[in-house]
């Protein structure tokens, strides 16, 4: 009976979503469970379906998005342990947020990293609900955290500090999640956990990093097809903002994370292009910031 009710609710939600045009996300979620042996695998497929619907079939903000404007993101959730008697899942999530570059067929990565503490409880066919002021489910808190983070980061690429209001909700989720026992929410426990990422991103000393998002994407990449030199100049200026952010808060991992997922793209912007001064400036900043990638940064000067 529970399975039948779940299927009926899924069908109704799908029909309802057709009438909606405000949903912000086009999020593709995969639940990978190859590491879990000897259990009923239907729970993982049910979970995957439920998470995709939870992220994509609701309006997270009052902003209006057309179908083609929805924000592209992916979440690959790898389940490492599953305890059916406790409905407990232990896993990690590799997520990526991207956006199209104007007047091109190219999509650029806006943010990407791995959440190593993606742990939660879920009983098959549970209805997933989220209430910001009464958070009592760690799974929906996790998903809401990323939903609002994706929207806020995307908005920052289209206008200076454009995601401020939405990112404030991400902060509120983290603050309200301090009662959860799962790892990933606590301050100072990990410099790349959920608390650290949003705390660093919205801290006033890291504002250059947020300004970078707009300058790099809107004034830089979006301009490249119209005027490559002007777009590259804006990207060079954004890399200088990356240096400023790192100088302001050297312990923040955000500049290094940015240089990791933007590595190949940045190299392609400057390799065999740009002035010697631009190349030297960008190379020096990135090699000082992230020397582990120096074999790639060397290509900038070619």
Image (spheres, rainbow, N blue to C red):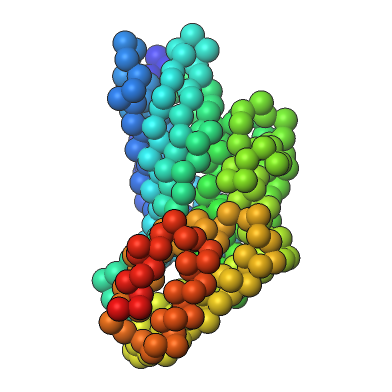
| Residue 233 location, quadrant | bottom left
Residue 67 x %, y %: 37, 61
Residue at left 45%, top 12%? 84
Residue 87 at what x, y percent from top left? 50, 16
Which residue is located at x 53 percent, y 66 percent? Answer: 288
Can residue 39 be seen in the rendering of this structure? Answer: yes
Q: Quadrant of the C terminus?
A: bottom left
* Displayed quadrant of residue 144: top right
Instruction: Out of 215 and 44, give the one closest to the viewer.
Output: 215
Left or right: 271, with 257 as reference point: left
Residue 186 occupies quadrant? top right
Toward the viewer: 235 or 174?
235
Q: Give the side of residue 36 with respect to residue 110, left or right.
A: left
Q: Position of residue 192 (x, y in %)?
A: 58, 46
Mark yes or no: residue 231 visible: no
Query: Residue 271, how many percent across, how many down?
Result: 31, 77
Q: Is residue 167 above or below residue 238?
A: above
Residue found at x 36% / y 75%: 300
Up the image or down, 212 lies above or below 225; here it is above
| Residue drawn 46% across the image and 77% down it | 282
Tell me: 134 left or right of 262: right
State left or right for residue 275 relative to residue 54. left
- Give the mark count: 0
In this view, the residue in front, 24 or 296, is 296
Q: Quick check: 214 above or below 163?
A: below
Q: Quadrant of the N terminus?
A: top left
């Amino acid at each position: 009976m529970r399975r039948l009710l779940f299927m009926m609710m899924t069908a109704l939600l799908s029909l309802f979503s057709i009438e909606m045009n405000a949903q912000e996300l086009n999020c593709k979620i995969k639940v990978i469970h190859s590491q879990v042996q000897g259990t009923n695998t239907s729970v993982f497929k049910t979970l995957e379906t439920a998470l995709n619907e939870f992220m994509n079939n609701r309006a997270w903000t009052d902003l209006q998005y057309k179908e083609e404007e929805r924000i592209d993101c992916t979440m690959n959730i790898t389940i490492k342990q599953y305890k059916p008697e406790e409905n407990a899942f232990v896993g990690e999530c590799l997520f990526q947020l991207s956006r199209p570059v104007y007047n091109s067929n190219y999509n650029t990565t806006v943010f990407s990293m791995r959440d190593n503490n993606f742990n939660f409880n879920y009983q098959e066919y549970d209805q997933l609900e989220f209430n910001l002021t009464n958070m009592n489910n760690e799974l929906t808190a996790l998903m809401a955290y990323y939903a609002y983070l994706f929207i806020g980061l995307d908005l920052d690429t289209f206008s200076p500090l454009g995601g401020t209001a939405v990112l404030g909700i991400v902060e509120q989720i983290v603050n309200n999640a301090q009662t959860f026992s799962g790892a990933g929410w606590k301050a100072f426990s990990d410099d790349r956990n959920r608390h650290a990422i949003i705390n660093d991103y919205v801290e006033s000393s890291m504002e250059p990093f947020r300004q970078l998002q707009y300058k790099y994407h809107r004034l830089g990449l979006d301009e490249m097809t119209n005027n490559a030199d002007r777009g590259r100049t804006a990207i060079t200026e954004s890399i200088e903002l990356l240096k400023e952010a790192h100088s302001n808060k050297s312990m923040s991992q955000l500049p290094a994370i940015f240089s990791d997922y933007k590595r190949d793209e940045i190299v392609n912007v400057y390799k065999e292009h740009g002035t010697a001064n631009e190349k030297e400036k960008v190379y020096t900043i990135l090699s000082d910031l992230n020397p582990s990638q120096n074999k790639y940064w060397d290509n900038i000067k070619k």
